[in-house]
């Protein structure tokens, strides 16, 4: 029997209002009931939409893996309402975690700490640590506070695909695999949280995100290492394991259905692709009007000018890729962003997105594979 599509409930809470509206409270009540009954609710956060289940309910958490098609080896981030709830899930509370939580929470940063025994194995993929985050999105914090228990929530999309930054993206990717979607509007940051392992000295960034290394170093008063891929290597280096990864940091990830290539391509280079019969979407920093006008006249090219500010770029990236994916083009070409820390998270996501589905298996086992995906301007 076909299930009906999930309800999408609008939940707004304008900044100038101290309390959410009555319909929003009712929507949160309904989400609470679904979660307590062991169901799945898609929740807005400031990073991307999450697919939430009560973190202490192993059976409910298991449903997240099934709905996403996510490998059991990839642990989940547990979302909490405050630091006290975070500490109740930790076996030990490192000084770095305390500082991050005090100064950067609520916010788009996740701490990895030793786990407490109450955290189910399914959440941590059987590991001895747990990843914790207190979202800045006050609506989601209110939901968790109403529940009184934490929520395990990875991004609300099928595994390996593009993360959702709107409720519509969630519905499109998960359909009736989710019981209820709370629509809090577009996500402010638009990329996933920074993940920091606080069990090591110095602390290690496992996933680059909206909080950059220099901000973290300033807050902690110590240096921080980056062990995830962050745009300074090639996809084959990540894939071959030459750059250490967090458990579950999969090589191909965050990918649109349309093949994506990172490039240093110019307008002439795109024109040559079109001449060879390709239909191309181009995310570009190029603003040379004379160059772009001729190209824009071609029905085979969609030009998407992208902002030069990395935070604004991040907030638009997935929505742009979702939209362009609908057009069923032959390829998406993305201008390679600058190799600076500020662009690290974006370079990381784009590089993973550029790895083809066939390449991920051979690359992750074959360190001799050379990187063939990005291409250079040859003119
Ligand atoms: P997402 O699937 O977008 O929610 O991403 C969750 C990220 O957090 C993945 O990259 C996980 O590998 C990482 N993560 C979650 N729990 C842990 C943990 N205990 N140790 C290290 N990384 C973790
Ligand atoms: Mg994800």
Image (spheres, rainbow, N blue to C red):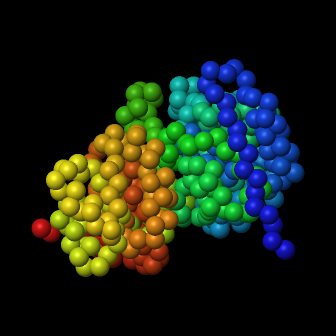
Residue drawn at the location 50% of the way across and 65% of the way down: 326
The quarter of the displayed image where residue 225 is located: top left
Residue 341 spot, x, y in % from top left: 33, 42
Q: Nearer the viewer, residue 375 or 132?
A: 375
Residue 317 spot, x, y in % from top left: 43, 51
Which quadrant is home to the N terminus? bottom right
The quarter of the displayed image where residue 215 is located: top left
Residue 332 spot, x, y in % from top left: 37, 65
From what the image shows, is residue 344 above or below residue 366?
A: above
The quarter of the displayed image where residue 170 is located: bottom right
Residue drawn at the location 40% of the way across and 39% of the way down: 311
Q: Is residue 369 left or right of residue 196?
A: left
From what the image shows, is residue 245 above or below residue 197?
A: below
Residue drawn at the location 55% of the way across and 60% of the way down: 248
Q: Is residue 376 left or right of residue 13?
A: left
From what the image shows, is residue 366 above or below residue 3?
A: below
Which quadrant is home to the C terminus? bottom left
Residue drawn at the location 46% of the way across and 67% of the way down: 327
Q: Is residue 291 left or right of residue 66?
A: left
Q: Is residue 215 left or right of residue 194?
A: left
The number of callouts visible is 0
Residue 159 spot, x, y in % from top left: 59, 64
From what the image shows, is residue 255 above or below residue 51?
A: below
Q: Residue furthest left?
A: 379
Can residue 10 be seen at all in this image of the molecule?
yes
């Amino acid at each position: 029997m076909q299930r009906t599509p999930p309800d999408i409930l609008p939940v707004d809470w304008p900044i100038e209002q101290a309390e959410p509206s009555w319909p929003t409270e009712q929507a949160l009540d309904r989400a609470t009931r679904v979660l307590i009954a062991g169901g799945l609710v898609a929740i807005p956060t400031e990073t991307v939409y999450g697919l939430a289940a009560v973190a202490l309910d192993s059976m409910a958490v298991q449903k997240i893996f099934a709905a996403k098609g996510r490998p059991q080896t990839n642990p989940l981030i547990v979302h909490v309402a405050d630091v006290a709830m975070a500490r109740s899930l930790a076996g030990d509370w490192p000084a770095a975690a305390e500082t991050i939580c005090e100064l950067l929470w609520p916010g788009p940063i996740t701490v990895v700490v030793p786990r407490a025994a109450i955290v189910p194995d399914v959440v941590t993929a059987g590991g001895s640590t747990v990843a914790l985050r207190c979202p800045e999105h006050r609506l989601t914090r209110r939901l968790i506070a109403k529940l009184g228990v934490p929520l395990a929530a990875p991004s609300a999309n099928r595994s390996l695909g593009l993360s959702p930054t709107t409720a519509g993206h969630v519905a499109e990717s998960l359909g009736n695999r989710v019981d209820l979607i709370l629509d809090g509007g577009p996500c402010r940051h638009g990329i996933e949280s920074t993940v920091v392992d606080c069990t090591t000295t110095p602390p290690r960034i496992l996933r680059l995100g909206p909080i950059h290394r220099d901000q973290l170093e300033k807050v902690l008063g110590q240096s921080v290492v980056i062990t995830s891929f962050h745009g300074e290597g090639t996809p084959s280096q990540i894939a071959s394991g030459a750059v250490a990864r967090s458990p579950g940091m999969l090589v191909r990830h965050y990918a649109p259905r349309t093949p994506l290539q990172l490039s240093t391509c110019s307008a002439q280079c795109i024109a040559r692709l079109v001449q060879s019969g390709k239909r191309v979407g181009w995310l570009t920093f190029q603003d040379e009007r004379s160059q772009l006008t001729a190209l824009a006249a071609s029905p085979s090219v969609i030009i998407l000018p992208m902002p030069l500010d990395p935070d604004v770029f991040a907030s638009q990236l997935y929505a742009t890729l979702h939209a362009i994916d609908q057009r069923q083009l032959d390829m998406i070409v993305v201008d390679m962003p600058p190799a600076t820390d500020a662009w690290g998270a974006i370079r990381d996501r784009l590089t993973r997105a550029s790895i083809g589905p066939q390449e991920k298996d051979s690359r992750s086992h074959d360190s001799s594979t050379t990187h063939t995906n990005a291409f250079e301007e040859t003119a």
